[in-house]
Image (cartoon, helix red, strand yellow):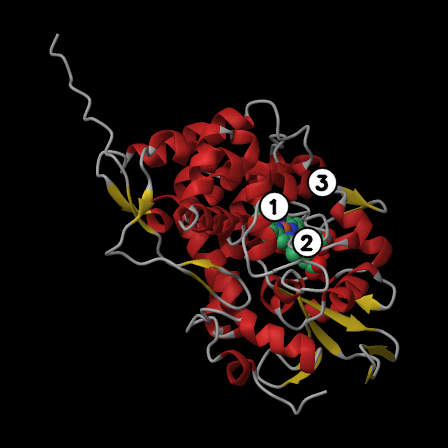
Amino acid sequence: MSDTVTLIDLFGGNESAPVPDPYSVYARLRRESPVTKLWGTGYEGYLVTRHADVMAALVDDELYSNKANTAGIGFVIGRTILEMDGREHTKHRQLITPYLAPRALRGDLPGRMERIAHELIDAFAREGRADLVQAFTFTFPLRVFVTILGLPVEDYEQVHRWAIDLTRVGSDPVAGMKAAHKLGKYFEPVIESRRREPTGDMVSQLVHAEIDGERLTDAEVTSFLRLLVIAGAETTYHLIGNAMTALLTHPAVLDEVRANRELLQPVMDETLRWEGPVQLVWRENVRPTTIAGYPLEAGSRLLLSIGSANRDPEVFDRPDVWDIRRDTSSMLAFGVGRHFCAGSRLAYAEARVALEALLDRLPNLRLDPAGESGIVGMAFRGPERLDVRFDPEPRRTTVAG
Ligand code: HEM
């Protein structure tokens, strides 16, 4: 194991000064120091970078506990399934899975998602240029998710700002705490009204659900909602931005995908492997153990790098190349095991609708040579801007009656 380092020593940045490329550092760590001792506020622990070790820790939920999340994200959002283990985790997770299962994602949801996507594109299709992040990817998934939660759609922008502040807790704990408090206040009347009058949405389910004969408290429901808002806001938005970045930097594949939309599934899977939106997850070993030969005391905090695992050449040939023809079945972008992403189906469904709509509505789509683009970040990865050009949609002529 190498000497103790901070994440800034390693990557030369943090969430507020985004890291352009962590992968060359990960490549070195996988070779020379697969378990690296970290120091720094919120990040004390051991960074684990090889696919085999990350996978083994995710699968073994008896040895590797999620209570490691209590100190970080749990500190601002409260106690949720993300920090629970065993039976408690199973019971709580079951409350939301029906709302995110394939059956729930059929019905009128695809139509609602398409309407939201096309409304957003209507606002810029005639301009011939746009920053796709600002104009589309940032907004789309949370607008969809607030309708799934049963919240008023006009609240999505404010909710989104709080969600982003929550995820920045590592670099700005004060902003994280403030956002947690404000989201709590925002949800108070929503929870109260669903208690009086359930409407069949996810919030009503959480408010009225019983676990071992006991209702969730308001604080428990609020924490659950904070987790869902982050999960719904900060993830799929990056998948759409990363997939568009990949397509725009591989124009031949973009043409193929335009002609054959079945390729969207491998595009999404390979993008998740190549540039996963969620790069790091925490675990804690409950007993003494070793990883890659390094001894770890019980209670060591482990930062598992999914992003590094997904670029491990032991598993993926030429891992830095985005190749939609490769086998991605071992990619870990949604985690694995009992905490496997509860919203993966929704993420795929949203990203598919978004990508289809962008390809349908923006002919001759290409990167703007005078603009900005590029995927950045350490814990979450995605483009901050994605400046593009396209053939503008003709202005509709209104015929006077
Ligand atoms: C591309 C988009 C997404 C990615 C890459 C992603 C990634 C992840 C990952 C890696 C985990 C595992 C965390 C761990 O093992 O500690 C996770 C958990 C979770 N995700 Fe997602 N996620 C995405 C979208 C969503 C969406 C749209 C939702 C909607 C509600 C969601 C809800 C959740 C929840 C509730 C958990 C906690 C599951 C548990 O602890 O049992 N995710 N996600």
Give the distance between the C-alpha atoms of the residues marked 3 and 2, in whole angstroms.
Answer: 22 Å
Q: Please state the horizontal and vertical placement of residue 380, each as a whole percent of the image.
A: 53, 62
Whether tag 2 and tag 1 are in contact, CB under 8 A, the answer is: yes
Nearest-to-viewer mark from 3 and 2: 2
Q: Secondary structure at mark 3?
A: helix
Q: Please state the horizontal and vertical placement of residue 229, each as a whole percent of the image.
A: 55, 50
The residue where tag 1 is placed is: 269
Amino acid under disc 3: Thr
Where 110 falls versus 60 (above or below)? above
Residue 396 shown left or right of residue 262 in the figure: left
The residue where tag 2 is placed is: 331
Q: Please state the horizontal and vertical placement of residue 260, each as a whole percent of the image.
A: 51, 29
Please tell me which of labels 2 and 1 falls first in the chain: 1
Q: Please state the horizontal and vertical placement of residue 115, each as a whole percent of the image.
A: 42, 28
Determine whether the beta carbon of the residue marked 3 sits less than 8 angstroms from the nearest atom of ligand 1: no
Please tell me which of labels 1 and 3 falls first in the chain: 3
Residue 5, quarter of picture: bottom right
Determine whether the beta carbon of the residue marked 2 sits less than 8 angstroms from the nearest atom of ligand 1: no
Amino acid under disc 2: Met
Q: Residue at x 55, y 73 (%)?
A: 24
Q: Residue at x 87, y 64 (%)?
A: 62
The residue where tag 3 is placed is: 97
Residue 103, quarter of picture: top right
Residue 110 shown left or right of residue 46 in the figure: left
Q: Secondary structure at mark 1?
A: helix
